[in-house]
Amino acid sequence: MGDVLRQEEIVNEARRFADEEVRPRAGEFDEHEELPRDIISRMAEKRYLLASLPEAYGGLSLDPLYYGYLTEAITKACCSTGGLITVESSLVGEALLRCGSRDLKDKWLPLMASGEKIGAFALSEPEVGSDAGAIRTRYQPEGSGFVLNGRKKWISFGAMADFFIVLASCGDQKTAFIVEREFNGVRTQPMKGLLARRASHVAEVELENVHVPAENVIGRPGGGFSYVVGTALDHGRYSIAWSGVAVAQEALDAMVSYARKRRQFDKRICEFQLVQGIIADAVTKTHAARALCIRAGELRKRGDASAVVETTIAKYFASKVAVEVAADAVQVHGGNGCSSSYPVERLFREAKVLEIIEGTSQIQQQLIARYGLRQYCRR
């Protein structure tokens, strides 16, 4: 019970932090396409950056369910701010914790927790997105280490990262490496003018004859895709599922608040049945998405083998709900919903990205269909 109370207080504090320090500046972050260092430092002070990781490494040791609640709380206020937790904790942090050597964990995780070093997960490439197994970045053994060549794209926080987990191939083998920004041949190019997550410092990363020492291999050579990528994407999808709930809930809050104040034909628009229908559907969808995320979190907490597919289901459904509820929130706002003066314009853009990152909705459908074909066939 004591640990539950501790985690509840952490999440409640995260909600206060989001309300007081993040939400009032979310539009500014989006407009300037930058997540300021002062916000990152504040998140590090509160140990949010590695919230799901053990306290021994500077994390908060949140169990999956409370990590989901914290992700929702921060992302609800600003998707880019919540996205930093997804990258640091779910993608980079969990990959290092579960797949990295003791030396790599001891070196990088405390630095990440303190905000002194920012990591990024470099998987996607200019010509490779959903077909992650077809990566073109190459590595070759050389001396006591390896040489990497290639390009990565759409790398969240890549423009500011101090190091990258880079997936590269050598023949049929896929291996994960830690590549430090200071290595010769590493260059990054910020990507501006994006639809959403504009403050996520998204970048292209170019690697030209980059020498990486053998101790920077994560896991074993050749095990990068099935082990490292599988681990990172599973945790990433769980975080994105909660992000979908966050966007849907924020859009729902904005929709209801506006409908209770806006007047047309001498009535508040919330009194019109058609608007009430939109609100009712939004409430139902948001509650259903949260229920799926809670189920996935409980299964992950127990270490249940079915947690992976339930996480996939939650990510697929919650991202769709975010898009639908955000679109309805814009509709309820009418012309005002198309203006950046109202948050639903930004939420509408942010929602769409959730159907793409950490595996598109179509990829999730394929995975869920395979599960359904195995699980529900009458014999």
Image (spheres, rainbow, N blue to C red):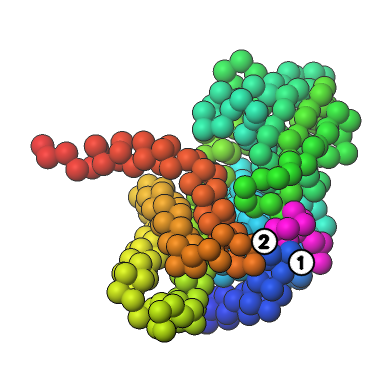
The answer to whether 141 appears left or right of 296 in the picture is right
Q: Which residues are magenta?
A: 29-39
Res 48 → quadrant: bottom right
Q: How many marks?
A: 2
Give the answer, above or below, for where 197 lies relative to 5: above
Give the answer, above or below, for where 104 lies relative to 72: above
> Mark on residue 327?
none
Assign the C terminus to one quadrant of the image: top left
> What amino acid does circle 2 point to?
Thr
Is disc 1 in contact with disc 2, using a CB cutoff of under 8 Å?
A: yes
Does the segment drawn in magenta span residue 37?
Answer: yes
Residue behind mark 2: 81
Instruction: Name the secondary structure under disc 1.
Output: helix
Question: Which of these two is toward me, 101 or 94?
Answer: 94
Query: Can residue 259 be seen?
Result: yes
At x 49%, y 79%, the residue is: 262
Instruction: Name the secondary structure under disc 2.
Output: helix
Specify which label sits upstream in the sequence, 1 or 2. Answer: 1
Circle 2 Cα neighbour tier, 10 Å, few/some/many (<14 / 14–19 / ≥20): many
Q: Residue 316, image x and y in percent?
A: 41, 49
Circle 1 Cα neighbour tier, 10 Å, few/some/many (<14 / 14–19 / ≥20): few
Question: Which of these two is toward me, 254 or 124?
Answer: 254
> What amino acid does circle 1 point to?
Ile
Does the segment drawn in magenta span residue 152?
Answer: no
Q: Residue 228, image x and y in percent?
A: 58, 39
The answer to whether 228 appears left or right of 142 in the picture is left
Question: Which of these two is toward me, 78 or 125?
Answer: 78
Residue behind mark 1: 39
At x 36%, y 36%, the residue is: 366
Q: Residue 347, image x and y in percent?
A: 56, 60
Give the answer, above or below, for where 25 lies relative to 135: below
